[in-house]
């Protein structure tokens, strides 16, 4: 009799665990219009509009950038951060001309793209914007795109100034707002492009840099955490893959 009760309890627990796993792995929610107020990361919105996104485990977050992104990857790796579901495409000293040659970025699975480029070639602003618009509607149409501000510099860096960086960031943010207004609506299949302002966060909270251009491990971790907290997708802990489905 005691063995029978034990077997019953084990079976019951297994059923409950399977039920919980199934409910988590089948999370889905509706694509939202650009002016919708997103819920906190980890919650599932109840609003229903055209299109839906289904999430399952191992959601990829893909970082695209220059030496600052390389530095962040190194800092996170040495700091013991779990980067299992992270991807990095980044090269030291690179910018727009390098980005257009990265053919692997034209064959991405659905992903959250975190793009942090421009400090090496602020003069390519219009080229970046044109490329992002083209890719958002073609190669990256099933991806959520986040453009991260070009972050500040300080002495002894002389290759770029914060005034130039602020002009670049302001124009990029204005372009993103215009793009979303013209291309994203409740009935559209186009995802909005998001902007993450780490520039002003660093100016407000402070940052550490030995050469005035690249950051300390602590600052890179600060940028990384701010980016993750700014992701406006309800994907729980940030892991899982999604597929976009148009409502019938």
Image (cartoon, rainbow, N blue to C red):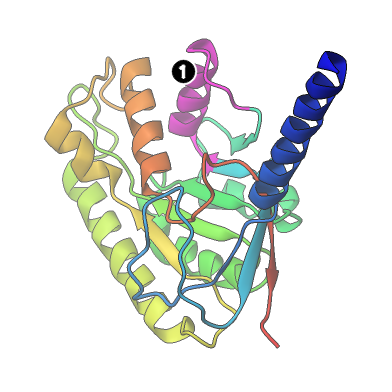
- Please say whether residue 72 is one of the residues in the magenta stretch: yes
- Please say whether residue 56 is one of the residues in the magenta stretch: no
Q: Is residue 75 left or right of residue 159?
A: right
Residue 69 can be seen, yes or no: yes
Q: Quadrant of the N terminus?
A: top right
Assign the magenta stretch its main secondary structure: helix
Q: Is residue 98 left or right of residue 210?
A: right
Residue at the image point whose x is 47% and y is 12% from the top: 79
Residue at the image point whose x is 17% and y is 24% from the top: 155
Q: Which residues are magenta?
A: 64-83
Residue at the image point whose x is 62% and y is 72% from the top: 52
Q: Quadrant of the C terminus?
A: bottom right
- Out of 16 and 148, give the one closest to the viewer: 16
Q: Dot 1 corresponds to which residue?
A: 75
> Which residue reaches farthest left?
204
**Callout 1 environment at 10 Å: few (<14), some (14 to 19), or many (20+)?**
many
Say how many tags the image has: 1
Using the rendered view, name the quadrant where residue 181 is placed: bottom left
From the top left corner, tell me how far across and down residue 221 is, in percent.
38, 24
- Out of 94 and 83, give the one closest to the viewer: 83
Q: Is residue 5 left or right of residue 157?
A: right
Residue 101 can be seen, yes or no: no
The vertical placement of 75 against 105, above or below, is above
From the top left corner, tell me how far across and down residue 191 is, in percent.
53, 71
């Amino acid at each position: 009799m005691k063995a029978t009760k034990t077997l019953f309890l084990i079976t019951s627990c297994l059923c409950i665990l399977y039920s919980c796993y199934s409910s988590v792995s089948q999370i889905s929610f509706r694509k939202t219009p650009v002016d919708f107020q997103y819920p906190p990361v980890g919650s599932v919105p109840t609003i229903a509009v055209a299109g839906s996104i289904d999430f399952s485990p191992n959601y990829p977050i893909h970082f695209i950038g220059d030496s600052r992104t390389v530095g962040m990857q190194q800092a996170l790796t040495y700091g013991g951060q779990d980067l299992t579901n992270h991807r990095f495409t980044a090269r030291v000293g690179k910018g727009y001309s390098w980005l257009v040659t990265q053919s692997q970025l034209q064959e991405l699975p659905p992903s959250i793209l975190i793009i942090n480029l421009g400090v090496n070639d602020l003069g390519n602003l219009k080229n970046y914007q044109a490329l992002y618009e083209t890719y958002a509607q073609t190669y990256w149409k099933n991806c959520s795109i986040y453009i991260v501000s070009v972050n500040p510099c300080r002495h002894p860096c002389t290759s770029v100034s914060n005034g130039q960086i602020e002009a670049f960031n302001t124009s990029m943010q204005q372009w993103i707002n215009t793009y979303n207004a013209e291309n994203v609506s409740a009935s559209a299949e186009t995802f909005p492009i998001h902007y993450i302002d780490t520039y002003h966060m660093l100016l407000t909270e402070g940052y550490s840099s030995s050469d005035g251009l690249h950051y300390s491990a602590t600052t890179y971790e600060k940028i990384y955490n701010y980016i993750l907290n700014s992701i406006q997708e309800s994907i729980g802990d940030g892991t899982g893959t999604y597929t976009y489905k148009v409502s019938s």
